[in-house]
Structures are given as structure tokens and as C-alpha cells.
């Protein structure tokens, strides 16, 4: 992986909260400095790059037109109403930028539920007509890594997989089966309590502290496909282990389809 010429990565921001960038900054295997200094060449990333203004735009232009090609990463949903005028970077709409750059990329990775399926800005009533990148661009193939935020393990794992073995196998939502092939519920440490009909009656209850199942408090783990219980965040913890129900953050339209998040 520490090859001489590191593959170029162009990281675009559309409508998002930058939480997925924040998560990637905290990757531990490898650490972010090893990732961007030894493994890839992060040629454009508005919130991480030192350059600003015209210099940043020039870096983007150079990377996109390099004969070696580039991998595109998109964070954020794409507003499409009024020809994308509701979301702009450097005077151009996010829709126009994605339309120009994504088709030129060797592969496009959508980091986060926003880029994958639209995310919170696509929740009803979706005033900006925000969509995931694939839908906004008429069905272009993207590798979707949903999660709000995406677990950095899944992002780095996908990049490494692409560099060593090519694109990973995807499910019918565009997610790598390797990371999203099982439900949260399948691997949950509280599953034995679910199977024994042992449910926590409230977040403050003794049963919740003892690790009883959070299903009756709103947990969406049975309908959510992600590897949180196996890899955790930063190999430390994940929502259900911390006592919070899974809200289904890696499923399409989860803000509308999975709410209310709490039942008590
Ligand atoms: Fe932020 Fe969530 Fe969208 Fe990531 S998926 S950019 S964390 S709102
Ligand atoms: Fe399934 Fe949620 Fe209960 Fe875990 S807490 S066993 S994911 S319903
Ligand atoms: Fe998201 Fe559920 Fe995992 S809320 S972080 S998919 S436990």
C-alpha cells in the first residue's frame, strides 16, 4: 500500500454536517496521518487542505485532469431543486460539481447516509430536493458507505479493498457486503436477552444497566445493516453498548422511515 505514486483522492463536500470527515480524522487503523501521507494522496478536501480559494480550486482542477486518474469521495446529499442552486461551493452548485467530477472518477465512494441516500436534508419535506449522489446523477454507480457518521473502519477498509483487490461486492443498496452484510441485531451483545424476552422498560432501569434488550425503547437494530457491534467506533464503543438504541442511521431514509427513534 505504501507505493511510490499514491492514488489521488478528490473529496467533495455537498450538503452535510462534516461529521463523516470528523469521524475519518479519528481513524485508528491506520491513523489519519498514515492514511493521507503514506497510502493515498488527498489532493482536494475543503476542510483538511491547507490551500484555500483559487489555490484550492486549482488543486481540484489538476487532480481531476491528471492522466493517472483519481478516486472521488463525496460527503453530503445533493440539493437538486432549481438546478441545484440551493447548495454552492466556489460559485458552482454542488449538483454541477458532482455532474462534472463523478463521471471522470475511476470509482466514487459516498461516505455517510447523506451522500448515499440524501440524509437529513432529504427528510420530509425535503425543501431542497436533496438526494444521494447516485440518484442525483441519474443512477451512476457509487459505493455507498452509509452511517451517520460512517464508521471510519468501513471507509478505510473500502479504500484499501479498492487499492488491493478492486471494488468490493455491493448489496442492492450499493453497500459493501463485507461491512453491511449482517444486521446490527445479528451481532448485538444484548441479543440473548431479546431471545429470552428480557426487555429494558426504561433507560434508567436496572434492566437497562444489566444489558437487557432495548427493542421496546425503540431500537431499530433488527432492520439495520451495519457492522457496529463487530468493529465499534474507534474500536471503543457503539450506540447499543453505550445504552442507546440503534436509530437505523445506515438505512436509506432513516430519518423518516425509522422515527420515532424513542419509544418509552
Ligand atoms: Fe453528517 Fe450524518 Fe451526513 Fe455524515 S451522514 S455528513 S454525520 S449528517
Ligand atoms: Fe436487537 Fe437492539 Fe435488542 Fe440489540 S438492543 S438485541 S440490536 S433489538
Ligand atoms: Fe447507526 Fe445503529 Fe450503528 S444508529 S451507528 S447503525 S448502532
Image: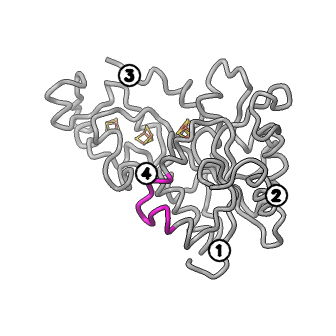
Mark earlier in primary sequence (4, 3): 4
Depth check, front residue: 13 or 253 = 13
The crowd level at tag 3 (other Cα within 10 Å; few <14, some 14-19, many 20+) is: some
Q: Residue tagged by mark 3?
A: 262
Mark closest to the chain's N terminus, 2 or 3: 2
Of labels 1 and 4, the one closer to you: 1
Which quadrant of the picture is home to ligand 2? Answer: top left
Instruction: Give SS at disc 2.
Output: helix
Circles 2 and 1, Cβ within 8 Å, touching? The answer is no
Task: Name the N-terminal-most of marks 2 and 1.
Answer: 1
* Distance between the alpha carbons at the discs numbered 3 and 1: 45 Å
Q: Position of residue 58 (x, y in %)?
A: 80, 57
Question: Which residue is at the far bottom?
Answer: 4
Distance Cα–Cα, label 2 vs label 3: 46 Å
Circles 1 and 4 in contact, beta carbons < 8 Å: no
Q: Nearer the viewer, mark 2 or mark 1?
A: 2
> Callout 4 environment at 10 Å: few (<14), some (14 to 19), or many (20+)?
many
Q: Which mark is residue 61?
A: 2
Residue 173, image x, y percentages? 63, 46
Residue for point 71% across, 34% down? 131
> Which labelled disc corresponds to residue 6?
1
Q: Which residues are magenta?
A: 24-34
Quadrant of the rendered structure where residue 195 is?
A: top left
Amino acid at each position: 500500500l505504501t507505493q511510490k505514486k499514491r492514488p489521488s483522492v478528490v473529496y467533495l463536500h455537498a450538503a452535510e454536517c462534516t461529521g463523516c470527515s470528523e469521524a475519518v480524522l479519528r481513524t485508528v487503523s491506520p491513523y489519519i496521518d498514515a492514511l493521507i501521507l503514506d497510502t493515498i494522496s488527498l489532493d482536494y478536501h475543503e476542510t483538511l487542505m491547507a490551500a484555500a480559494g483559487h489555490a484550492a480550486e486549482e488543486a481540484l482542477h489538476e487532480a481531476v485532469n491528471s492522466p493517472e486518474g483519481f478516486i472521488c469521495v463525496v460527503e453530503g446529499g445533493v440539493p437538486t431543486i432549481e438546478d441545484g442552486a440551493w447548495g454552492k461551493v466556489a460559485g458552482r452548485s454542488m449538483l454541477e460539481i458532482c455532474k462534472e467530477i463523478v463521471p471522470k472518477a475511476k470509482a466514487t465512494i459516498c461516505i455517510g447516509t447523506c451522500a448515499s441516500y440524501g440524509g437529513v436534508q432529504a427528510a420530509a419535506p425535503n425543501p431542497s430536493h436533496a438526494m444521494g449522489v447516485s440518484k442525483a446523477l441519474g443512477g451512476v454507480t457509487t459505493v455507498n458507505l452509509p452511517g451517520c457518521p460512517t464508521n471510519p473502519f468501513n471507509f478505510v477498509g473500502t479504500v484499501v479493498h479498492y487499492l488491493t483487490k478492486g471494488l468490493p461486492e455491493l448489496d442492492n443498496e450499493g453497500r459493501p457486503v463485507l461491512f453491511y452484510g449482517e444486521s446490527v441485531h445479528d451481532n448485538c451483545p444484548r441479543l440473548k436477552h431479546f431471545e429470552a424476552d428480557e426487555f429494558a422498560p426504561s433507560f434508567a432501569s436496572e434492566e437497562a444497566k444489566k444489558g437487557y434488550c432495548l427493542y421496546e425503547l425503540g431500537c431499530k437494530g433488527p432492520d439495520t445493516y451495519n457492522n457496529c457491534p463487530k468493529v465499534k467506533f474507534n474500536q471503543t464503543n457503539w450506540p447499543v453498548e453505550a445504552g442507546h438504541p440503534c436509530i437505523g442511521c445506515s438505512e436509506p431514509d432513516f430519518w423518516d422511515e425509522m422515527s420515532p427513534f424513542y419509544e418509552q
